[in-house]
């Protein structure tokens, strides 16, 4: 059933565009053409996020902050082994995926830590990447408030994820 979703959706769009007398190919190419300047405008923001994420990891700051915050995270129910995942996830989805893979290898995929790590990975977001993409296209450059709110919500989801995995 799901294999037919994309072709059916494509046909619905094609029929709708013919009914509305819109040339679908021209509309697609115009949309793609208008997307190029947007991609060019967000490119510096994305590069800065990627470079800063790599610097955070390679400089040892992620290990330092993991060790520093582990006792606080432990009080909130987040195991020490997951602090690095919680810290990296707002910066890099691929970095967090690498940490998730390490947790699977070290503790097993059916362990409490692996379950928590999966839920943390799925319930939190790469806040800085999303902010870079969103604010590159937005007129306002007031980043602090939405980023702080996003980080607090992401951290709350991590705490709640560990709590849910504990009781299940």
Image (tube, helix red, strand yellow):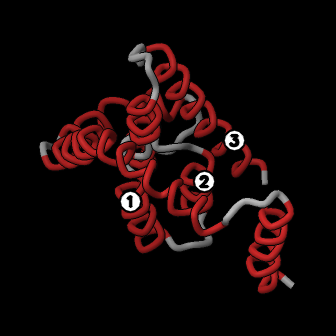
Kind of element beneath mark 1: helix
**Distance from Cα at disc 1 to Cα at disc 2:** 13 Å
Q: Closer to the N terminus: mark 1 or mark 2?
A: 1
**Distance from Cα at disc 2 to Cα at disc 3:** 15 Å
Kind of element beneath mark 2: helix
Which residue has dot 1 on it?
Answer: 94
Q: Quadrant of the C terminus?
A: bottom right
Query: At which x and y percent is residue 13?
Result: 78, 66
Query: At which x and y percent is residue 114?
Result: 55, 62
The quadrant in which residue 135 appears is: top left
Q: Residue at x 43, y 32 (%)?
A: 137
Position of 70 with respect to 65 (left or right) is: right
Kind of element beneath mark 3: helix
Contact between labelled residues 3 and 2, with CB atoms less than 8 Å apart: no
Position of 57 with respect to 7 (left or right) is: left
Decide which of 28, 49 is in the foreground and name it: 28
Q: Residue at x 41, y 55 (%)?
A: 96
Query: At which x and y percent is residue 102?
Result: 38, 67
Position of 159 with respect to 141 (left or right) is: right
Which residue has dot 2 on it?
Answer: 122
Q: Quadrant of the N terminus?
A: bottom right
Q: Closer to the N terminus: mark 1 or mark 3?
A: 1
The quadrant in which residue 28 appears is: bottom right
**Distance from Cα at disc 1 to Cα at disc 3:** 25 Å
Decide which of 148, 57 is in the foreground and name it: 148
Q: Residue at x 66, y 66 (%)?
A: 24
Which residue has dot 3 on it?
Answer: 163
Query: At which x and y percent is residue 10?
Result: 74, 74
State whether residue 24 is above or below residue 133. below
Q: Residues within 10 Å of mark 1 (few under 14, many from 20)?
A: few
């Amino acid at each position: 059933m799901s294999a037919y979703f994309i072709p059916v959706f494509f046909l619905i769009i094609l029929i709708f565009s013919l009914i509305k007398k819109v040339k679908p190919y021209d509309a697609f190419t115009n949309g793609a053409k208008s997307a190029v300047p947007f991609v060019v405008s967000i490119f510096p923001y994305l590069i800065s996020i990627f470079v800063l994420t790599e610097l955070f990891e390679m400089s040892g700051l992620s290990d330092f902050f993991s060790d520093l915050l582990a006792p606080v995270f432990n009080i909130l129910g987040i195991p020490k082994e997951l602090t690095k995942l919680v810290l990296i996830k707002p910066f890099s989805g691929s970095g967090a995926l690498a940490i998730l893979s390490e947790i699977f290898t070290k503790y097993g995929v059916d362990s409490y830590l692996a379950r928590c790590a999966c839920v943390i990975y799925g319930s939190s977001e790469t806040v800085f990447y999303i902010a870079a993409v969103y604010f590159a296209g937005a007129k306002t450059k007031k980043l602090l408030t939405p980023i702080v709110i996003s980080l607090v919500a992401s951290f709350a989801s991590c705490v709640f994820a560990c709590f849910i995995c504990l009781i299940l």
